[in-house]
Each structure stands twice: as structure tokens, then as C-alpha cells.
Image (spheres, grey):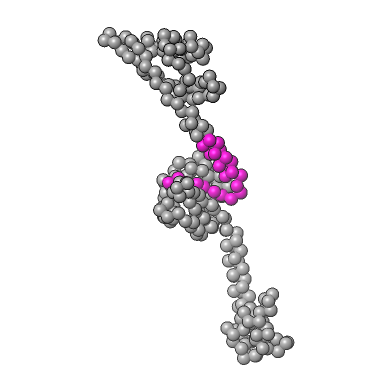
Amino acid sequence: LFELQREDSLGHTATELRGEPAARSAAAEREMLLDPHIIRYEQSRELPNGHTIQYQVTKAPVLGPDGKVLNIVCTFNEITELKQAQSRLSTQLRLTQALLDAAPIPISIKDRELRFTHVNPAFEQLLERPRASVLGVTSRSSRGAASDYGESLERAILERPHVEQYESDRDLPSGKRIRMVITKGPVLDDAGEVTSIITTYTNITDLKRAQEQLADQLRLMRIIVDAAPMPISIKDEQLRFSIINGAYEKLLDRKSTRLNSSHVSESRMPSSA
């Protein structure tokens, strides 16, 4: 591990072999002689070949019949690759959070236990839920039975990876009610197993309100058109009849079901129709 020859080490102290870098280790060992106990710590060392390794050290005393320390047993466990993997993971987590924070759409990520692991500022703003109150908990624990449908879809995704999308109304802490399109999908590992579930939330409250207002206006227009005593027809941009009233039907002896969505040429009506 340390690229040392046994004969070069035996009979020497760590301080004699390595100088100042071993001072901390030597101080800890002297404390163990006075107060026997086990110590553990992590350390890095530059090897003769120029490489730097990281390792975990465990030191335990061997006691004699009188309770005094006879020897100190040291074990060394190299953790270089583990530390490198942890560093890469930490970097990846920071990158993931940075991407989420920059995304304009609300996003959340849950683990296999359906606990929130990530949410972005857009999520906090739309759903009025601070990140600190969400991370590490499930929707069920924070929203109760209102989250049952969404969690049932998430469990289905864990069993068979696929994407789910649905509309949902949500009552916010401020008292507002919004309508959202919620999309849930799996994040897979190299083996194709679901590691987490990502969810996006699209606020369609204004769109739904506009659609409802448009539908109301269309119903009102049909009532007005039907009540008019004179024949009336309305055509779309493809010159297809979209609305005719009762007076028009009576005048030309044509039923609306035969004319609606029909082209002018298809209806075989006079050019003045």
C-alpha cells in the first residue's frame, strides 16, 4: 500500500520515517499509552511514485495483565476510489440541483421510498411549499389522503417503468386553488431499474378559465343566434358551416346536423347562402 520495504520500517518510529507528517499520529499513540482507547481517522499520503492515496486508519491497544498498553495495532484501509466516487457523486448532485434551480418549470424528484430528494424554486413558488418542509418526507405525510392518487401512480411506475400524466386541482396554503397538468416518469439506472421518480407541474389554471369562458360565450352566442328571427349562418376559415339557426333551417329546409362542418360547395346551396 505504502510502497515501503519491511526492513526499512522495522525498528523505526513513524516520525523517523516520515518526519513532520507523522507527528499527529505519534501524538495520538502517546495518548493511547496513557489512556487506552481505539481511535479512527482518515488520512492522505503521497507515495514515492508521486501518487496520492487516501486511507482510513484504526488504532487499537493491546493490554497486558496489569492493564497497561503492550502494543498498538494499526490497520489501514485504502479508500482512494471510494473518496473519488463520493466526490464525483457530490459534484453530480450539485450539478443536478443547479439544473433544477435554473429550470423555469416546477420539478420534484423522489426516491424509491417516495420521499422528496429534490425540488426547485419554481416548485416552491407554484405550490407554496418551502424546500425545507418537503425534503425527506412523502406526499402522504405532508398532504394526507389528498396525495393517494399521485402516490398510487408512482408505485405503479416503480413496478413497471412508464410515464403518467393527469390533471389535478390543488388547494394552496394561501387559499388559492390551481389546476395543474402533472407528469410523472422514472429515472433508470444502467440495469433498467427505477432509482427515482421525477415529476413536473404545469399550471393550467388560466388556460382552463379561458376555455370555460370561451365555452360560455359560445353557448350564449348559440342562444342569441337561435333566438334571432332572421336566418343566420356562421362559417369558419375553411368556409365550413359551423353554426346555423332555426330560421335558416326553416328557410332552406336544411337540418343543422347536415350543414355543420360541411363546406359551402358540399352543401350545394346558392352562392348567396
Image coordinates for residue 136, horizontal then vertical, percent: 45, 41
At horizontal 53% and vertical 19% (from top left) the residue drawn is: 48
Please check the rendered image and state whether residue 258 is part of the magenta-colored stretch, yes or no.
no
Q: In screen coordinates, is 170 left or right of 209?
A: left
Residue 267 point in image, percent of width and height: 65, 86
Quarter of the image with the N terminus is: top left
In the rendered image, the vertical position of residue 66 relative to residue 165, given as above or below:
above
Give 100 or 254, whichever is nearer the viewer.
Answer: 100
Q: Is residue 2 left or right of residue 67?
A: right
User: Which quarter shows the C terminus?
Assistant: bottom right
Relative to 189, does residue 235 appear above or below in the rendering?
below
Give residue 228's quadrant in the image: bottom right
Evaluate whether residue 174 shows in this view.
no
Q: Which of 205 and 16 is in front in this view?
A: 16
Q: In this view, does 26 lie above or below 232?
A: above
| Residue at image point 37% right, 16% down | 73
Which picture quadrant has residue 38?
top left
Work out whether residue 4 can be spotted: yes
State the predominant SS element of the stretch in magenta: helix
Residue, far left: 65
Q: Give the range drawn in magenta.
A: 88-112
Residue 231, position as x, y percentages in the image: 67, 85
Above-or-below relation of 83 to 68: below
Asked if residue 143 lies left or right of residue 264, the reply is left
